[in-house]
Amino acid sequence: MHERAGTPATESDLINVEALVKAYYDRDPDVSEPDQRVAFGTSGHRGSSLTTSFNEQHILAITQAIVEYRTSQGITGPLFIGADTHALSAPAMTTALEVLVGNQVRVLVDRFDDFVPTPALSHAILKWNNDPVRRAEGEADGIVITPSHNPPGDGGFKYNPPHGGPADSEATSWIAHRANGLIADNMRGVLEAEPSGVETYDFRGNYVDDLESIIDFDAIRRSGVRIGADPLGGASVNYWSAIRDKYNIDLTVVNERVDPTWSFMTLDWDGKIRMDPSSPYAMASVLAHAGEFDILTGNDADADRHGIVTPDGGLMNPNHYLAVAVEYLFGHRSGWRADAAIGKTLVSSSMIDRVAAALRRRLWEVPVGFKWFVPGLLDGSVGFGGEESAGASFLRFDGTAWTTDKDGILLCLLASEIRAVTGRSPSQLYAELVARFGDPAYERTDAAATPAQKSVLGKLDAASIEATDLAGDPITAKLSDAPGNAAAIGGVKVATADAWFAARPSGTENVYKIYAESFRGPEHLKSVQAAAKQLVDDALADA
């Protein structure tokens, strides 16, 4: 923990925006260096111009590769594109438009030159493709330029195919391979043109007007719930006032500042500026307003994550809120399929498992990454999909898809609906779940690992773990594939009746991540974590 975690940023913490943008254009990546290659994680390619990992050549090549990929897939409709408030997003947007126009792709940008949240772009893709008349013109897809909650010096670039959600590994691998090839070949094959004649689309208006199909604003309005919303300087900044005005609810935007240095933020746990609405350190300035509202919320830079603050409980742990949201939604959405499942990533809390069992709903447990929820949200077989990192989405009242990417705005609004309909805060409702199912202790820690060990862990077969007990309790499951869809989890998960751990290699650092939870309290959790590290280290001993 950094000694200044939770304290206001100072001048020395801020990025030099001019130097950052200059490096974007001046530095040329060397793809023989692993850290300078195009590499898609669970949410696109990310990096910084100052480390030559997010520069003009990267975006030129990635965009050209996307153009070629969509052609190979027969995608002939428009491409929606939007960007968040990071300093590198605007130059990357200009670069991408030059390539898209150079390749004669029909492009739609925001009508009001506004920032575009990830969920608004996913919503736009689905709205186009669900309209038979528009779809006849060709399926649409999209690009979101954002590194999500990452620090101000970072940039990010995500591709969403026609299903509206994050591209799957097959697509991103193809795009990354082609992009690195273009860079290595001195950008031969990249077509560029002045970005003229680009069409526009009202992302904000279409998204906000459609929210009544998924959120009970009548209940929120009648109850008089006092709502505070902090965009944390991100892309949702103009959406919250539009929601207030459209639905006439008691909502205050507590911070409307947009500053690419994020000078108004408090430092996160490691002393960095990071727009993580699930972190009490990054949200410290927001928490100062907790007593002023019935529900107070925060979003990250592209608004695909949520933070929920209640006057009685402070900032909710994302796992706690997901469990409350699941119980509420499956009790108040009669238009959903009777067999609609509850989707969770395998590193999310087992409290959700216990709620699902009580609801007699199928639990659909998948690997880390929101892309796994896309098929179920599209066909209505999954009513809710959520990640422990404060990302989730769910179906409309009628059981049809809303977005197939994470929607932090939606989950924030749901907290107000829950408060309005039940008369209790999400924190109070979680306390009721604890009284029924137990009080789990949950934590994620990191342990050192060499690149070779990370590679072994990512391919580890759970059968190679020979232990029969975990922290003194019999092991009931050893997993290297997710039970929901049999996809490889890129690590292992080991469970007992009252505890579990999962270990996965980091994609960016020489560490592996241990997620662990115990329903027998913090001390038992420590025992689980120690046993988990030993089990994994033993399995990696020969790497």
Image: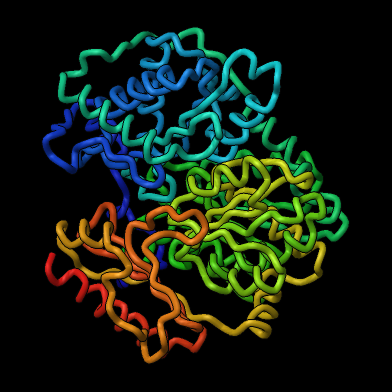
Q: Residue at x 49, y 59 (%)?
A: 345
Up/down of 161 relative to 415, above or below:
above
Residue closest to the eye, 104 or 540: 540
Quadrant location of the N terminus?
bottom left
Q: Residue at x 51, y 15 (%)?
A: 76
Residue closest to the eye, 519 or 376: 376
Task: Estimate the x, y position of residue 304 in percent, counting from the top left.
Answer: 53, 47
Quadrant location of the C terminus?
bottom left
Q: Is residue 136 left or right of residue 506?
A: right
Q: Quadrant of residue 188?
A: top left
Task: Estimate the x, y position of residue 521 in percent, counting from the top left.
Answer: 48, 88
Q: Is residue 188 visible?
A: yes
Task: Estimate the x, y position of residue 265 in percent, counting from the top left.
Answer: 44, 56
Up/down of 244 relative to 222, above or below:
above
Up/down of 465 relative to 363, above or below:
below
Q: Residue at x 29, y 33 (%)?
A: 176
Q: Residue at x 32, y 68 (%)?
A: 462
Residue closest to the eye, 10 or 100: 100
Outermost residue, right side: 222
Task: Estimate the x, y position of residue 106 in percent, counting from the top left.
Answer: 51, 13
Q: Can residue 516 be seen in this view?
A: no
